Every structure is written in structure tokens, then in C-alpha cells.
């Protein structure tokens, strides 16, 4: 009896945790379908008027464009950096390999304020401050370690003998990469790109430090609206961010077995 | 690419062959450049600034950095501990710091208490459920933190779902004030911090040899005893890393809302803009 009870308590705990993780976002998105002028849950009627208002507002559309430009640049930077590094880690032996690998992952565990504030000086002195590029570089610091993690799992799972055969038959290292490795790890590259995109489009604090009024990304417009003029328009903007994020994550889960990210044993 | 050592015999060496011995460093170089230029050096720069003499003005060294005479808030080429002395003797800074540290410890404690069992649940879950749980856990970290915080605000508001539930169950007849309290602050901060903690602990548990657990069970230990004497001690090193990450986030992430909320930041931002329009 006690064992059964414990088992139920155990599952109940996990379910409660999942509610804790999901409820805030579900509520935020539901609010966006209200027909009312105020932020409240839609009770009898659902409406898309705030989404319509979002897409008709030039300020929001401009921020959406900025967000997409920054996210696009983030994908390019973090894929180049992450893919090269993942190849190095999985195909070559390094002295202090584990240490270098761990160090490479540190930016992802660094709070955004620290990255944003410290990059401010560099951004200003190089004249990059306020541009899309510097925001994308900051976002890449969070994104590229994830690209490395994702690609390394995938690269280590490949059959090495295919590459060796290709090399033995005269393919150059570049040909091996383009013709053999890239097609095989293609889905994981896409997962890395999706992660980079999701991180960039949602990130707020670095964008606040490094952007200006000309490079306002969506979260930067959400923030003052949330503080000073609370309208369901903000909920619509949040809804769009959440939609993109959830679709991106589900697509990643389809393309790659995300379980392998936590099941992967580094000492293997 | 692993056959870089292959004997090239009579073939003429191409550029690719010449670069081959350095391939691994070339592949790492974009990352090293990015990390040095935009992560390590900026952090060191921030550290260096803390030892500059102050000019008394505020601002992020924009004027000084741009080399304008009298601009910025620090005097270049100086070394002093004044800033630290002033920080540690100022009542206001000290009270803010004490609150920050206290709050971070609370958040860390709650996070670890919730994260470890959840990580263990994910570790023991069947494959499909595991994938779903990983997606759910990582969602708050990848989502926009503003959406998260405002969703929680709506949930915990006086007319929010949680209060309606409380009144329905009959715990209280009138709504309990939940927003803008230590409780709501902790609930939202933990949610922002916990995903990486859970994932790092889950990954740690997966590095353990499952046969040790099986042996312990086979020798007659109860599931709880097995966990307490075998699994948990072995997971301690990874859990400590998770703890470290949690503390860093609890400390660092707290700065953001308080920083974003005060009027000084507003003036600072308008100062940025006016300066930018002049240059």
C-alpha cells in the first residue's frame, strides 16, 4: 500500500512540475485570443483581432524584421563556429580535450546581463554598437555551445569507416566533409540552426544592452509595452514568439532524438 | 579526416595537405576568436574598469571609451581600489547586495530541491516520455523570459486562476495577495533558473553505470537504499556543477529585473541615444 502511494506521489510530483513549467506560457498565449480591450482570459468568444492589430502596426512589424535579421545572422555565426568546433572535438584528439570542451560550453551558462554589459565596451570601441551584427554575435555566444553539443552527439555516432574509405579513394578532406559528413549530419545541423533561431528571437537582455531604437527586436518592444501600456497586443506578440518557439522545438524533436543530448556520455 | 597521417608518397603536396597537420587548430579557431574577442576580453575589460578612478559621473564608459575629453565615468590609466571601498562601505549597495545574495541562496535551495527529483524522474522515464519531458523542461529556458514572467503574473493575480482555485477549494474566502511578494518572485526566478539545473543533473545520472544499480538491487537493497547508497553519491560531482550553474544564474539573473526596473537605466538609455545621434 505504501509503495503504491509513494509511486502515485512520485508521478504527481512530476505532473505538478510540468504544470509549473507549462502553465505560465499557456496562459500568456490564451490571453492573446481575447476579444476584450483588456488582458483577460477569453471566456465565451475568441478573437484574432490582436493578431490583426499586431500585423498592421508598423512598429511591431519593424521589430519583427529586426528580430528575424538578428536571428538569421545568429544562425550563420553559430553554425560556422559550432560546426567547425564540433568537427575538431569529434575527429581529433586534444591535450586537455575535456577541459577545452567544458570551457567552450561556459557562455551558455553565463547570464545575459554579464554578456551584455561586458560586450558593451567592445561594441562601442569597434563601432559595432547598435548594429544587428553585434546583437547576433552576443546571441551566438549562447547558441554555438548548443550547436556543438547537438553536432557532437551526431558526429560521434557516424561510422568512421565511410570517411576513411572516401579518403582512401582519393577524396580531399573538404570533399569528405561536403559529400559524406554534411549529408549524414544534415538533420542535426538543422536542429542546431533551429536552437540558434529560438534563442535569438526570444533573447531580451543582450538586445537591450547592445541595440538601439533602430535595431529594436521584438522582446525589446514587448518590455515597455508590458510595463506601461498593458494591452492584449503584447499577448499577441508573445503568442507569436511562443508559436515560433514551440514549432521550432517540435521540429527539432522530429529531426533528432533529443534524448541523446542528456544520455550522451562524454567519456565515451 | 582522421587519416591526416597518411603517407603521401610521390604525390605533390597541395595546400590542403600542407594545412592538414594544423586542421584541428584551424577548426577550433573561429570559436577561439569569438570566445576571446567577445567573451573573455570583454569580461577582463569590465574587471579592469572596476579599478579605474571614477569621474563621478555615471554611464558605461561610453565617452571615455570613445576618447572624448572629459567624457565617460572613469579616468584612463589609473589604478585604484576606491570603487570597491565605496561599494563595501555604502549602506545602500550593501543592503542591495545582501538581499541579492540572500534571495539567490533561497532560489538556489528551492531549485535544487525541485530539480534533483525531477532530473531523476526524467532519468528513469521510458524513452518517449523522456523526450517529451526534456522538451517541457527546456521550453522555459528557450522562451522569452518576459512572456514567462507575465504569464505567471496573470496566474497569480488577485483574480487569477490560482486564487480562484484557492477560493474554490475553500482555503480562503478572499483572494490572497500573491503577486509582488517574495513568493511570486521566487516562483518566477526558480522557473527561469531550473531548466539547465535539471538537464545537467539528468546528463550526470546518465553517465553512471546502470549495472551498479542492478547489482545493488540484486544483492537485496531496497530501491531507496540503492538510490541513497549508490546512485546519489555517484551523482554528487555532476550535481555540484549543476549547483554552481544554479548559483551563477540565481545571482546574475536577479540583476536583470532590478536593473530594468529602475529609473536610472531609463536615463542611461536616453543618454546612449542622444550621444549616438550626435556622432
Image (cartoon, rainbow, N blue to C red):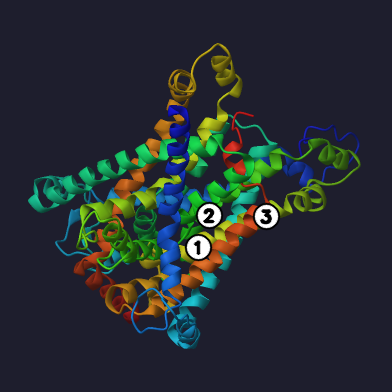
Instruction: Please state which of residues B64 and A93 is positioned toward the viewer in this rendering.
Output: A93
Residue A200's disc is 1
Asked if labels 3 and 1 touch by Cβ distance under 8 angstroms, the answer is no
Quadrant where the image shows the N terminus of chain B: top right
Report the chain holding disc 3. A
Can the viewer see residue A15 in this picture? yes
Labels 1 and 2 touching (C-beta < 8 A): yes
- The vertical placement of B19 against A233, above or below, is above
Left or right: residue B205 compared with residue B44: right
Is residue B234 shown above or below B251?
Answer: above
Q: Secondary structure at mark 3?
A: helix
Q: Residue visible at 57% across and 57% down? A: A195
Residue placed at 43% from the left, 51% from the top?
B39
Q: Residue furthest top?
A: B219
Q: Chain of mark 2?
A: A
Tag 1, which chain?
A
Residue behind mark 2: A143
Label 2: which secondary element: helix
Q: Position of residue A60 (x, y in %)?
A: 45, 81
Determine the CA span between mark 1 and mark 3: 21 Å
Give the alpha-carbon distance from disc 1 to disc 2, as whole Å.
Answer: 8 Å
Q: Measure how far apart labels 3 and 2 are at the Cα level.
A: 20 Å
Do dots 1 and 2 share one subunit? yes
**Residue B140 image point, x, y percent:** 45, 55
Amino acid at each position: 500500500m505504501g509503495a503504491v502511494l509513494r509511486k502515485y506521489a512520485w508521478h504527481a510530483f512530476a505532473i505538478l512540475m510540468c504544470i509549473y513549467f507549462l502553465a505560465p506560457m499557456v496562459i500568456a498565449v490564451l490571453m492573446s485570443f481575447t476579444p476584450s480591450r483588456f488582458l483577460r482570459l477569453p471566456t465565451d468568444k475568441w478573437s484574432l483581432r490582436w493578431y490583426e492589430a499586431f500585423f498592421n502596426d508598423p512598429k511591431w512589424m519593424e521589430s519583427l524584421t529586426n528580430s528575424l535579421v538578428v536571428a538569421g545572422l545568429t544562425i550563420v555565426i553559430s553554425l560556422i563556429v559550432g560546426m567547425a568546433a564540433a568537427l575538431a572535438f569529434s575527429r581529433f584528439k586534444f591535450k586537455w580535450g575535456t577541459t577545452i570542451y567544458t570551457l567552450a560550453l561556459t557562455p551558455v551558462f553565463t547570464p545575459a546581463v554579464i554578456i551584455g554589459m561586458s560586450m558593451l565596451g567592445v561594441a562601442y570601441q569597434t563601432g559595432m554598437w547598435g548594429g544587428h551584427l553585434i546583437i547576433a554575435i552576443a546571441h551566438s555566444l549562447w547558441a554555438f555551445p548548443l550547436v556543438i553539443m547537438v553536432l557532437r552527439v551526431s558526429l560521434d555516432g557516424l561510422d568512421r569507416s565511410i570517411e576513411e574509405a572516401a579518403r582512401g579513394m582519393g577524396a580531399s578532406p573538404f570533399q569528405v566533409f561536403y559529400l559524406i559528413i554534411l549529408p549524414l549530419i544534415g538533420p542535426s545541423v538543422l536542429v542546431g540552426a533551429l536552437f540558434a533561431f529560438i534563442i535569438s528571437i526570444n533573447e531580451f537582455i543582450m538586445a537591450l544592452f547592445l541595440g538601439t531604437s533602430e535595431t529594436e527586436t521584438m522582446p525589446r518592444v514587448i518590455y515597455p509595452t508590458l510595463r506601461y501600456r498593458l494591452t492584449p497586443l503584447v499577448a499577441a506578440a508573445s503568442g507569436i514568439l511562443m508559436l515560433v518557439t514551440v514549432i521550432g522545438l517540435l521540429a527539432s524533436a522530429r529531426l533528432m532524438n533529443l534524448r541523446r543530448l542528456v544520455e550522451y556520455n562524454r567519456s565515451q | 579526416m582522421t587519416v591526416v597521417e597518411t603517407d603521401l608518397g610521390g604525390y605533390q603536396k597541395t595546400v590542403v595537405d600542407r594545412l592538414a597537420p594544423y586542421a584541428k587548430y584551424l577548426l577550433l579557431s573561429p570559436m577561439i576568436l569569438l570566445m576571446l574577442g567577445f567573451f573573455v576580453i570583454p569580461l577582463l575589460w569590465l574587471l579592469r574598469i572596476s579599478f579605474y578612478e571614477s569621474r563621478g559621473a555615471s554611464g558605461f564608459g561610453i565617452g571615455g571609451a570613445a576618447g572624448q575629453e572629459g567624457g565617460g565615468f572613469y579616468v584612463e590609466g589609473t589604478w585604484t581600489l576606491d570603487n570597491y571601498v565605496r561599494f563595501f562601505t555604502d549602506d545602500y549597495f550593501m543592503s542591495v547586495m545582501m538581499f541579492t545574495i540572500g534571495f539567490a541562496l533561497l532560489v538556489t535551495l528551492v531549485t535544487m530541491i525541485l530539480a534533483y527529483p525531477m532530473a531523476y524522474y526524467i532519468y528513469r522515464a521510458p524513452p518517449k516520455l523522456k523526450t517529451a519531458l526534456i522538451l517541457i523542461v527546456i521550453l522555459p529556458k528557450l522562451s522569452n523570459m518576459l512572456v514567462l514572467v507575465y504569464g505567471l503574473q496573470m496566474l497569480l493575480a488577485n483574480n487569477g486562476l490560482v486564487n480562484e482555485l484557492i477560493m474554490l477549494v475553500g482555503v480562503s474566502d478572499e483572494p490572497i495577495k500573491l503577486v509582488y511578494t517574495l513568493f511570486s518572485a521566487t516562483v518566477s526566478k526558480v522557473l527561469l533558473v531550473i531548466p539547465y539545473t535539471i538537464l545537467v543533473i539528468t546528463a550526470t545520472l546518465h553517465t553512471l553505470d546502470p549495472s551498479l544499480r542492478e547489482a545493488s538491487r540484486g544483492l537485496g537493497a531496497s530501491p531507496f537504499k540503492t538510490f541513497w547508497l549508490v546512485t546519489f553519491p555517484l551523482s554528487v560531482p555532476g550535481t555540484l556543477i549543476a549547483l554552481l550553474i544554479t548559483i551563477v544564474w540565481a545571482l546574475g539573473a536577479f540583476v536583470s529585473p532590478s536593473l530594468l526596473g529602475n529609473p536610472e537605466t531609463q536615463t542611461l538609455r536616453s543618454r546612449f541615444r542622444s550621444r549616438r545621434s550626435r556622432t
